[in-house]
Structure formats: C-alpha cells, structure tokens
Image (tube, rainbow, N blue to C red):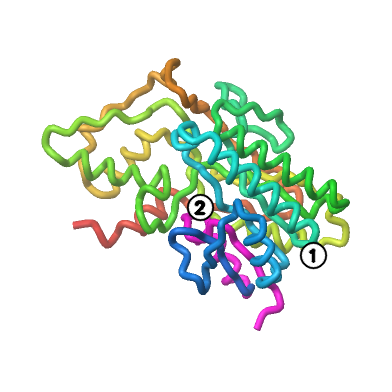
Amino acid sequence: MSNKTALVTGATGLLGRQVVRAFERGNWNVKGTGYSRADGVSVLKVDLVNADEVATTLANVKPQAVVHCAANRFPDKCDKDPEGTRAINVEATRSLASQCAARDIFLIYISTDYVFPGKPGDAPYEADAKPQPTNLYGQTKLDGEHVVLEEYKKAGKPGLGVVLRVPVLYGDAEMPAESAVNVLMDSVWKAQQEGTKIKMDHWALRYPTNGRVCHDVSMKYLGSDDRSKLPQILQFSSEDKFTKYEICQLFGEIMGLSIASIEPNSEGNDPNASVQRPYDCHLSTKALKDIGIDVATQDFTGWWRWNVKAFRK
C-alpha cells in the first residue's frame, strides 16, 4: 500500500476525475470529495462551505496533497448567484487553504485563464502578468488565488500552497454539459434536425486542454528541499487553438456530419450582456517548463477521432 495520499475536491466533475486517475496511476491512495454525486466510499460527501466537515475530512484522510478542483465554474451561473459563487469559490477556498496550511498539507488550487482580460494582442499571458478579469467568475477565481497564497504566507509556509491556472478542459465526460467543449458535440447532432438553426461563436479563441500535470506538480513540490524557491503560480495549456465554430467544424468532419445549420457568429461580446467573455486568454506554460514539468497535452483532433470511433457509421 502506498504511503502517499491525495485528496481531490470536486472529484465527481470532469477535471476532478482526471486528477484522481492521474494520482492513482502514480500509485497514490486517492480520496475525493463531492456532493450530489458522492458515493460515500471513494468520493466522500463534503460541504466545502462547512469548515467543520472539511476539518473532519482532512483529519480522517490525512492527505499529503490536496487538489482543489471544486468551484462554481459556469460564468452565467456565477452571475445569477454572486453570493453563492463567492461562498464556494472564495470563502470555502480560504477555509480549505487555512486548514491545509495548519496541517502542512500541499495544496494545488485550480484557477482559470479567465483571470486575464484577453484583449486582442495581449496573449500569451505569463504567470506574472497582471490579471484583470472581465466577469464575476474570473474575479472570484482570482480572489481564490489571493486567499490561498495569503493563508500559506500567514502560516509561514510559502510554496506549500500553489495556484494552477488552466483553460477550457475536455475529456471523458459523464454528461456533455460537464465541458464547454464536449457539449459542442451535442450542437453538431442537433444541427442534423430539419429546420434547426444554431448560432455559434466564431470570435473568442479557446485552447481546449486535456493533461495530467497535477500529479507531476505535487511530486515536484513535495520532493523539494526548498519550496520557497519554486513559483507559486503555474499555468498549463494546450497549444491547440479553436473558436467554438471551428470545434464544431472539426466534430462534423470527424463524425461525417454536416454543420450547414450552424452559423458562425464573429460579432464578439454583446455590449449589453451581463457576462463579458475575453477574446484570447492563452496561457504561457513557461513557469512549468522552467521547473522541469512536462507540459505535453493530448492532441485535440487525435483524441476526438479516437473517442468517437464507436459512433461512426
């Protein structure tokens, strides 16, 4: 039995499941936390807003590493529930970071490329570039970054808490809506229905990513004699670049389906919309490369060709 244990919050979600599998492949004992989909065995039902439940979980699991994936990550939902979003994205993060720091537990806080404004010509963003979120989701994730680093600094343990920013993710989803990428396959299928017309964004640039970097970061930091010399903010991203419409084009080609009913929309943000999305938030992976972490990701087209092979006629 391994003597290394990892705890993954949000373990029932797309990213959380990927992180669990990566640690398992690295021969770690892994426990997850979830809520509505927790099974009570490998995934514990924990209300992360409840500090006592978090404390009990940390005491029982005794992890060396925690990867904090849980978040309200849908920009439109965040805007409709700002109080609930801050409770999970900021205050629950603060409580978790404080308790992990007190127990000398290494914490990776999963953040987002949406902490940046994404103005044309600005990308790629280095890890030390100035954040300037364009919506509440990005702001609460940035605030979460701040509270993690503050709690570890306050505890006198800088380097034991790390921020890892990632872009839009894809992978083996239990339901397409788990990923803003996977769900586009649904749009391609809907476009086959007679009389259907779908407008699809052909403005914002996205870098859909699938990789296993959290395990490698944990091993690097836990094995370091002086974590204070390692960066506290890291970024991971694919170099594959698409608009949503271009992803639909690719899915149509792979599936042998027409996307004639999907209309490209290159107008950008509606100035009257409550949620403003950035144009290009491409993340530089230089900080990871500088500490010797492999930043290879799945080839987007290759992964999808393999993933949907069973559905081709």
Residue 276 lies, with reference to residue 186, above or below; the image says above
Q: Specify whether residue 110 is painted magenta.
A: no
Q: Looking at the figure, which quarter contains the N terminus?
A: bottom right
Question: Which of the numbered marks, if any, corresponds to residue 13?
Answer: none
Q: Is residue 86 left or right of residue 100?
A: left
Q: Secondary structure at mark 2?
A: loop
Q: Is residue 202 left or right of residue 96?
A: left
Q: Specify whether residue 14 is painted magenta.
A: yes
Residue 299 lies, with reference to residue 45, above or below; the image says above
Q: Position of residue 298 (x, y in %)?
A: 50, 54
Question: Which of the numbered marks, if any, corresponds to residue 223?
Answer: 1
Q: Position of residue 214 (x, y in %)?
A: 63, 57
| Nearer to us in this view, 209 or 84 | 84
Q: Looking at the figure, which quarter contains the C terminus?
A: bottom left
Which residue lies at the image location 62% right of the left edge and 51% below the top edge? 295
Which residue lies at the image location 52% right of the left edge and 64% below the top edge? 45
Q: Is residue 57 left or right of residue 136?
A: right
Q: Secondary structure at mark 1?
A: loop
Check the image and name the residue furthest to the left. Answer: 194
> Which corner quadrant of the image does residue 234 belong to?
top right
> Which corner quadrant of the image does residue 224 belong to?
bottom right
Q: Are the two marked residues, 1 and 2, in contact with CB atoms closer than 8 angstroms?
A: no
Which residue lies at the image location 71% right of the left edge and 31% below the top edge? 129
Magenta-tinted stretch: 1-27
> Crowding near pointer 2: few (<14 within 10 Å), some, many (20+)?
many
The amino acid marked with disc number 2 is Asn
The amino acid marked with disc number 1 is Gly
Residue on which disc 2 sits: 210
